């Protein structure tokens, strides 16, 4: 039996909250992946010729389908990811439709040919054409199954590319069914469904996709896996966008409105049980607000209802999606408690079935605790006490990750000052995580949080090759005679360069007159 035959052939899918079996999904083997990429290349040639009107129509069909089938989609998300119906609706349906709306409104504006100046070449005209790259691979995690798929594909699709998505095996069941959305939209406008395809499987399937020589890779995931993607992409010099998570800080100033700060922190930490790359894991609170803040967040967190979600708000939070993540969270919390951390809420894995871990709040934290530096990606709030702005900023920047951050303050100028000093890809003043919702803003990180951006003009254009075009401005046929070299060519070129780039009008005029004299001498003096 060869090595390929020994690979698993299906993924067994479970509801992470109830452990109810959902079904089996076929794994794409390396040879399957090659065929998927080949089909995408053929489909992309047709899609690249589509008009912006046709592309908007496909996006409209996707958005309309999502809105029309929101209840069924939320049900599917809840079953496959363990979250609540409210989070499925507000955390997946809303931001996905928001992104599509932005692309429909601004996509053509940022992708159509752009006229630019021609500089010193006054007889020429310049423009930039935004040419589709070809086939874009999106390797995406499990925390937002619908949003990660649709929001990842719509920008490269709008830019004229075919898209292949490799979702996490943890949400293979719902991911396979989400393909119905794009199949429907493409068929409505007469385009091949091979324009958007899935690769299902584990690491072997993802590695096969990278080695299949796609034209760009979007990766959303951990730093460790990001390094593997970068190493594999180097073989074909494939460009990548790396969104590698964060350890986001939220600074609560001493003038902050208490309830504003408390609910910003609760939302930033516990939405989707903290399974967010932009989760506010580190809450840095100034002394004047610290005691009241801790008392209030503990009061709310200890009142959370957790369990298997039903429609109608029976619980506040559901389960984690991955059993591996439950083990990671438990290990990090236990380590912190063993080293002296104080538990204000949660802190202990509940008995029974399902991938549950309660919303947890820890204080009295020290640098020897692994949780202080490590991304938790789970329902844990770390609360730190500081004296002033300087100490808060230093603590916020004391991390190898720098995705997003927040500042809560009544003083707008103070918020701006602090924001400018925080080392992160975005800062949200007086809220949490909403920089991602504003699609005009680029979304990306600094440090080990990755590089490249999603969203906004720059994120959209990153799925194109900016092609420079320089053409004649006038119908003149003037040969650019550079050879043979004449005796006065050096002096003439020097005078021209000084005239064009020298400082001061007098210096420019002097060299213009010199250029004229040299030209006359070159023409009449043999």
Image (spheres, helix red, strand yellow):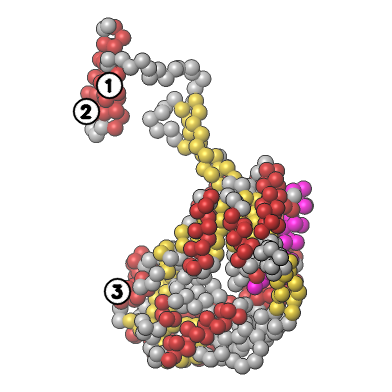
Between circles 2 and 3, the one closer to the viewer is 3
Residue designated by label 1: 490
Instruction: Give the CA distance from mark 2 to mark 3.
Output: 51 Å
| 445 to 41, vertically: above or below | below
Q: Is residue 180 magenta?
A: yes
The crowding category of the residue bearing disc 2, from other C-alpha atoms within 10 Å (few below 14, some 14 to 19, many at least 20), is few
Pick the residue in front: 332 or 473.
332
Quadrant location of the C terminus?
A: top left
- Residue drawn at 35 percent across, 75 percent down: 395
**Residue 276 location (% of width, % of height):** 54, 73
Residue designated by label 2: 506
- Residue drawn at 51 percent across, 69 percent down: 222
Residue designated by label 3: 390
Quadrant location of the N terminus?
A: bottom right
**Residue 49 location (% of width, % of height):** 67, 41
Q: Earlier in the sequence, mark 2 or mark 3?
A: 3
From the viewer's perspective, tell me whether residue 125 is left or right of residue 66: left
- The range drawn in magenta is 170-191
- Please tell me whether mark 1 sits on a helix, a strand or a loop: helix
Between circles 2 and 1, the one closer to the viewer is 1
From the viewer's perspective, tell me whether residue 167 is left or right of residue 362: right
Among the 4 quarters of the image, the one containing residue 500: top left
Instruction: Give the CA distance from mark 1 to mark 3.
Output: 58 Å
- Residue drawn at 46 percent across, 59 percent down: 451
- Please tell me whether mark 2 sits on a helix, a strand or a loop: helix
Pick the residue in front: 513 or 451.
451
Q: Is residue 400 magenta?
A: no
């Amino acid at each position: 039996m060869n090595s390929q035959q020994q690979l698993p052939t299906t993924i067994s899918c479970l509801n992470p909250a109830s452990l109810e079996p959902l079904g089996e999904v076929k794994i794409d083997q390396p040879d399957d992946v090659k065929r998927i990429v080949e089909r995408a290349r053929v489909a992309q040639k047709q899609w690249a010729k589509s008009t912006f009107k046709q592309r908007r129509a496909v996006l409209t069909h996707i958005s309309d389908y999502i809105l029309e089938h929101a209840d069924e989609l939320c049900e599917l998300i809840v079953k496959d990811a363990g979250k609540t119906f409210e989070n499925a609706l507000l955390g997946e349906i809303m931001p996905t439709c928001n992104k599509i709306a932005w692309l429909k409104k601004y996509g053509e504006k940022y992708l159509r040919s752009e006229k630019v100046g021609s500089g010193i070449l006054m007889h020429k005209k310049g423009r930039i054409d935004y040419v589709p790259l070809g086939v874009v691979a999106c390797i995406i995690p499990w925390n937002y199954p619908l949003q990660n798929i649709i929001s990842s594909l719509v920008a490269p699709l709008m830019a004229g590319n075919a898209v292949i998505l490799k979702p996490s095996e943890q949400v293979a069941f719902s991911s396979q069914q989400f393909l119905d959305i794009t199949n429907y939209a493409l068929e409505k406008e007469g385009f091949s469904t091979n324009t958007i395809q899935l690769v299902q499987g584990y690491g072997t399937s993802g590695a096969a996709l990278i080695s299949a020589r796609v034209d760009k890779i979007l990766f959303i995931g951990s730093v460790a896996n990001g390094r593997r993607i970068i190493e594999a992409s180097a073989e074909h010099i494939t460009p990548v966008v790396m969104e590698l998570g964060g350890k986001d800080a939220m600074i609560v100033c001493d003038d902050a409105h208490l309830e504003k700060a408390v609910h910003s922190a609760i939302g930033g930490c516990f939405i989707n049980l903290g399974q967010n790359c932009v989760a506010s894991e580190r809450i840095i609170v100034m002394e004047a607000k610290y005691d009241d803040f801790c008392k209030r967040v503990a009061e709310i967190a200890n009142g959370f209802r957790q369990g298997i979600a039903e429609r109608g708000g029976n619980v506040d939070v559901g389960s984690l999606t991955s059993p591996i993540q439950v083990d990671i969270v438990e290990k990090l919390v236990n380590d912190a408690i063993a080293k002296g951390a104080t538990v204000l809420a949660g802190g202990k894995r509940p008995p029974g079935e399902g991938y549950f871990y309660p919303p947890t709040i820890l204080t009295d934290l020290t640098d020897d605790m692994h949780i202080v530096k490590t991304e938790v990606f789970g329902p844990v709030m770390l609360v730190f006490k500081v004296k002033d702005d300087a100490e808060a900023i230093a603590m916020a920047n004391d991390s190898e990750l720098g995705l997003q951050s927040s500042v809560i303050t009544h003083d707008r100028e103070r918020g701006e000052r602090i924001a400018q000093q925080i080392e992160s890809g975005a800062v949200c003043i007086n809220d949490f995580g909403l920089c991602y919702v504003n699609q005009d803003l680029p979304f990306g990180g600094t440090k080990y949080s990755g590089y490249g951006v999603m969203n906004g003009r720059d994120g959209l254009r990153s799925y194109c090759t900016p092609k420079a075009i320089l053409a004649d401005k006038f119908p003149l046929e003037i040969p650019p005679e550079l050879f043979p070299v004449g005796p006065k060519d050096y002096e003439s070129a020097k005078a021209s360069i000084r005239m064009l780039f020298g400082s001061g009008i007098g210096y420019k005029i002097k060299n213009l007159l010199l250029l004229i004299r040299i030209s006359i001498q070159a023409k009449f003096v043999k």
